[in-house]
Image (spheres, rainbow, N blue to C red):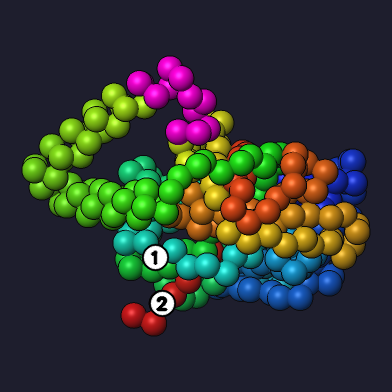
Amino acid sequence: MNTFLKAIGFGNLKSQKDVEDMIVNVISKAADVDKYTRKEGNTYIEYEMPTSSSCGIKVVGEEDHEGKFHFSHYFPYIKAPVDNTEEEIYINKKIDTDGYTGMCDDYRLGICLIFYLQNVADYYNQFGEVKMVSDQAVRFGALAESGKIILPTFSYAEEQVKLKKEQTKKNKLIAEAKKGNVEAIENLTINEIDNYAKVSMRIKNEDLLSIVDTSITPSGSESEMYSIMGNILSVSSETNVQTSEKMWVLQVECNEIKMDVCINCADLLGEPEVGRRFRGNVWLQGKLIKTNG
């Protein structure tokens, strides 16, 4: 049973039979069906059923030459409206299922960001069976098993402008370093040493949450799992139309990466408001969007 079903309002599923009934319901009442015919002739197929304005469930499988559907797996998802442009995105099939992950080396983070690909059939139909695409957009969404609301860090407007300029400069240095620019690599190294020294001094008298504004770091053994802390840009409440459970959908910004996070109201500690911060462990998902270019 997918542990993130509760995030989209399915906290009442208690047994494997409940899950199987849900899968049958998705297939029979799917609002959207996406297909892709593989080279060997079988058809990859996704049944999609929304359960609220932003969330839903997808059932994935394969249709054989006789038109029979063979179930592979299912997953809850969240739709996200904000595009994040990425330079290069690598697509890889997971070992245990027909699920796929995307990986992008995001210069805003300085790490490889791995996400669960939501629209595999759509991706294949638009891009073909390629492993790498360039200059495309990804809409990031995340499902949270639990989380809490924390207060923002205190800073003046002048400090925000300064930090923004420093981040822009750092992004350019990372982009140059990726090209092999030795001077850029040296500058980044010096900056990291300076930052480490500043944090080491401040941590003696301050709490870490007052020093670090936002963060996103890998968490756990699954590659798409992250521990995030980000500024809340918008807040909305949604209801699962099948179970009547309430969820929060928060648009969160972490290190200039914007994503929509869905969490069951029962699993969120604190009252979410714009300007506050969200902190929690999430399953990162992404929808690959073909740009006009």
Quadrant into which the C terminus falls: bottom left
Task: Please tell me which residue is depicted at 50% across the width and 42% down the height of the picture.
Answer: 154
Labelled disc at residue 42: none
Question: Residue 71: which quarter of the image?
Answer: bottom right
Q: Is residue 86 left or right of residue 143?
A: left
Name the foreground residue: 86 vs 133: 86
Residue type for callout 2? Thr
Q: Can residue 76 be seen in this view?
A: no
State the residue position of label 1: 85
Mark-to-mark CA distance, 2 and 1: 9 Å
Q: Which residue is drawn at 63% across and 65% down?
A: 79
Quadrant into which the N terminus falls: top right
Q: Looking at the rendered structure, which numbered label has been put on residue 291?
A: 2
Query: What is the three-letter code of the residue carrying label 1?
Result: Thr
Q: How crowded is the residue under tag 1: few (<14 C-alpha within 10 Å), some, or many (20+)? A: some
Q: In this view, does 14 lie to the left or right of 214?
A: right
**Tag 2 near tag 1, CB within 8 Å:** yes
202 inside magenta stretch: yes
Look at the picture and state if 233 lies above or below 223: below
Pointer 2 local density, CA inside 10 Å: few below 14, some 14–19, many at least 20: few
